[in-house]
Amino acid sequence: MFGLISLLQKDFGFLDVSKAFTQNNTKILNDFWIKTVNIEGLNFILLNPYNFPVVHPPYGYFPHPPKKFLNLLEQEINRVGACNILTHFPIDFFWWKKSRKGHTLRKIMENKNVKYIFSGHMHPGKFEIKHHDYGG
């Protein structure tokens, strides 16, 4: 997602092709940042830590979500209970940001409700499973 002025701009095709985020259910940025879906009894929290406008490469490779993003995520993890996290960005990519409670994303992911974290962005030579401390 590069060079986008607004979440709701007409040529933002992601909202036209995604099954979870659509033009009908994504009306405000909070809807896009954090979305919970339940698949066969498992809760998945989908994260999109983009803040609009989104710059062009090479300046936009790292997310810069505001504190509000982390606050909403903490609330959602506590609201849904046992969950899995799906995000393109590994949890250490925005270590400098802290929630209202003073938690970094890594600390938020240590919540006992978070069972597994699935992320992309990294391109290792071989697949790795990394343990995040509390059973995940």
Image (tube, rainbow, N blue to C red):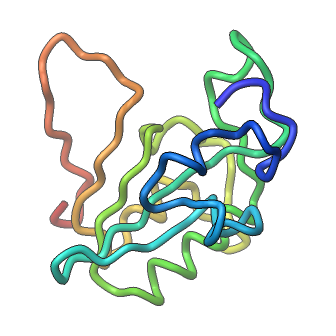
The percent position of residue 73, horizontal first and vertical second, equals: 56, 69
Q: Is residue 130 above or below residue 27?
A: above
**Viewer-nearest residue: 13 or 123:** 13
Residue under the image location 82 percent in, 45 percent down:
9
Q: Quadrant of residue 27?
A: bottom right
Residue at figure coordinates x 67%, y 71% from the top left: 71
- Towards the viewer: 114 or 30: 30
Residue 33, position as x, y percentages in the image: 62, 59
In the displayed structure, 23 sits above or below 62; it is below
Image x and y of residue 134, in percent: 23, 66
Position of residue 38 relative to residue 69, above or below, is below
Residue at 75% of width from left, 60% of height from top? 67
Residue plotted at (47% across, 89% down):
79
Relative side of 41 to 48, left or right: left
In what quadrant of the picture does the C terminus appear? bottom left
Quadrant of the rendered image containing residue 10: top right
> In this image, 29 relative to 16: left or right?
right
Q: Is residue 92 left or right of residue 1?
A: left
Quadrant, the N terminus? top right
Relative to residue 105, is residue 123 depicted above or below? above
In the rendering, at what x and y percent does residue 87 appear? 43, 47
